């Protein structure tokens, strides 16, 4: 069995941090600069800012550096760059889809909020994961990743809400 908890944690930490940091350090200027799409709704909405994108990627890469230092394998820094960019891409894609579905900013969507970011992290990280941690790509690992990510995302957002960082607990 390919199941390797350590490898899964090493994979998950950078995109988790990339996804969480913008909630604390997000900025004001929206990535879509306030423009509307063809349907008259915002392209992405005010919840996706340039500063959030930037601090998310930097935060995730810093975790990757820590992992590289801890394991003595610099590939984790590069993997973190890919998976952090993937997480932010998935987050942006989720908002894009939510706006097209007429969801106002902040309205929860199981797939778009909780899972798309980690799916995109898996996709962008795939070339490196296949090389250095193929066990993470095993079907049972991906199942665990999706379940754990859903639970973690719910718990972290409830905490962020209690701390006053987020208006809504999702
Ligand atoms: N955030 C940011 N920049 C990003 C991503 C997130 O500034 N690229 C900040 C915003 O303050 C945002 C918060 O993190 O409100 C929470 O992110 P998220 O839940 O993804 O955004 P929502 O406000 O819920 O908007 P959406 O409905 O588009 O998901
Ligand atoms: Mg949200």
Image (spheres, rainbow, N blue to C red):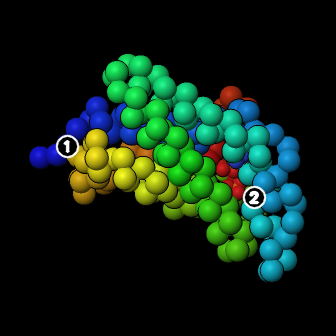
Q: Residue at x 23, y 46 (%)?
A: 135
- Say whether mark 1 is within 8 Å of ligand 1: no
Near-viewer residue (65 or 156)? 65
Query: With respect to residue 67, does 41 lie above or below?
Result: below
Q: Is residue 72 left or right of residue 60?
A: left
Whether residue 157 appears in this view of the structure is no
Q: Give the alpha-carbon distance from disc 2 to disc 1, as whole Å.
A: 37 Å
Q: Badge 1, how many Cα within 10 Å: few under 14, some, many 20+?
A: some
Q: Which residue is mark 2?
A: 105
Q: Position of residue 121 (x, y in %)?
A: 47, 51
- Say whether mark 2 is within 8 Å of ligand 1: yes
Q: Residue at x 81, y 67 (%)?
A: 42
Near-viewer residue (158 or 11)? 11
Q: Is residue 12 left or right of residue 163?
A: left
Task: Give the number of the disc on residue 34.
Answer: none
Q: Position of residue 99 (x, y in %)?
A: 72, 68
Q: Residue at x 30, y 36 (%)?
A: 7
Query: With respect to residue 23, does 42 lie above or below?
Result: below
Q: Secondary structure at mark 2?
A: loop
Q: Position of residue 91 (x, y in %)?
A: 61, 54
First in sequence: mark 2 vs mark 1: 1
């Amino acid at each position: 069995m390919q199941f390797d908890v350590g490898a899964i944690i090493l994979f998950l930490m950078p995109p988790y941090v990339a996804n969480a940091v913008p909630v604390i350090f997000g900025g004001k200027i929206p990535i879509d600069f306030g423009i509307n799409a063809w349907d008259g709704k915002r392209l992405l909405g005010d919840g996706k800012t340039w500063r959030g994108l930037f601090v998310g990627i930097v935060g995730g890469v810093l975790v990757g550096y820590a992992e590289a230092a801890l394991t003595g394998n610099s590939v984790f820094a590069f993997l973190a760059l890919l998976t952090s960019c993937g997480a932010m891409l998935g987050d942006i894609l989720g908002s894009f889809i939510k706006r097209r579905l007429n969801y106002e900013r902040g309205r929860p969507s199981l797939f778009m909020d909780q899972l798309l970011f980690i799916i995109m992290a898996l996709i962008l990280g795939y070339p490196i994961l296949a090389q250095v941690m193929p066990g993470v790509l095993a079907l049972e690992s991906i199942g665990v990743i999706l379940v754990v990510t859903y639970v973690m995302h719910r718990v972290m957002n409830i905490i962020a809400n209690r701390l006053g960082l987020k208006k809504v607990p999702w």
